[in-house]
Amino acid sequence: MSIPRLLDHIVIAGPDLDALIEWFADRTGVTAERGGAHPTGTANALVALTVGEQRGPQYIELIGPDPDRETAALPTTFAIDTLDEPRVQAYAVHPHDIDATVAAARASGFDPGDVWELSRRTPAGELLEWRLTGAAMHRLDVPFLIDWGTTAQPGTGELPTIELVSFVREEPDPLAVDTALAALGLGDGAAETITGPRPGYRLELQRADGALVTC
């Protein structure tokens, strides 16, 4: 079992959110709960993760274009505009101090991006606010950092659940990823990097019937 200790959430993106929710339900037997829209032109749906007997606060975010976005162009967030099918695109970790982690990483030669603010409203109208680094905009191979502040982390809410078995990063040459992770100083808080034939994430989940699903 390989699960990042500081994991906040895993991002699965696709070019159409409705199709993405259906794809995930077909594979896992779990229908994600819609979360709301972002100012970036995206919208999401969520599934909480269990690890053994523990539920959350980790979760999966299914993210795609907001059907009600102002422009017809697909959003560039998580490279959604390049996708023609669902893909595990990124993940977030929650360091103890996001600003200190950014400063230390920059001092060690890796810039995880500025810390900026985002928000969305749930379908019930609740405002969620958080801070995160911009690394997800240009480095999908390393985690972005997130801080929920006073907002309750979504994985603790009343969401459908599925069990997380493992989550790793596969790279033909892990050096660039491992160098960035070392600068971030996350240790086992980040996903393990393994050597493999093609770059990407390997997510393993366990369905309610015990079957394993790899994404």
Image (cartoon, grey):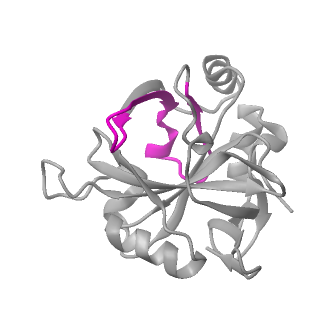
Magenta stretch bounds: 120-148
Residue at 55% in and 70% down: 30
Is residue 100 positioned above or below 54 on the image? Answer: above
Residue at 64% across, 74% down: 198
Q: Quadrant of the C terminus?
A: bottom right
Quarter holding residue 6: top right
In the image, residue 104 lies in the stretch drawn in magenta? no
5 lies left or right of 89? right
Residue 210 vs residue 20, the one in the foreground: 210
Percent of width and height locating residue 5 = 80, 43
Q: Residue at x 73, y 61 (%)?
A: 168
Instruction: Answer whether residue 2 is visible to the viewer in this image.
Output: yes
Q: Quadrant of the N terminus?
A: bottom right
Task: Return the residue nearer the eye: 210 or 179.
Answer: 210
**Residue at position x 41%, y 70% in the image:** 20
Pick the residue in front: 120 or 93: 120
Residue 18 horizontal/vertical position (percent): 33, 69
Percent position (x, y) of residue 123?
33, 45
- Position of 7 with respect to 76 (left or right) is right
133 is within the stretch colored magenta = yes
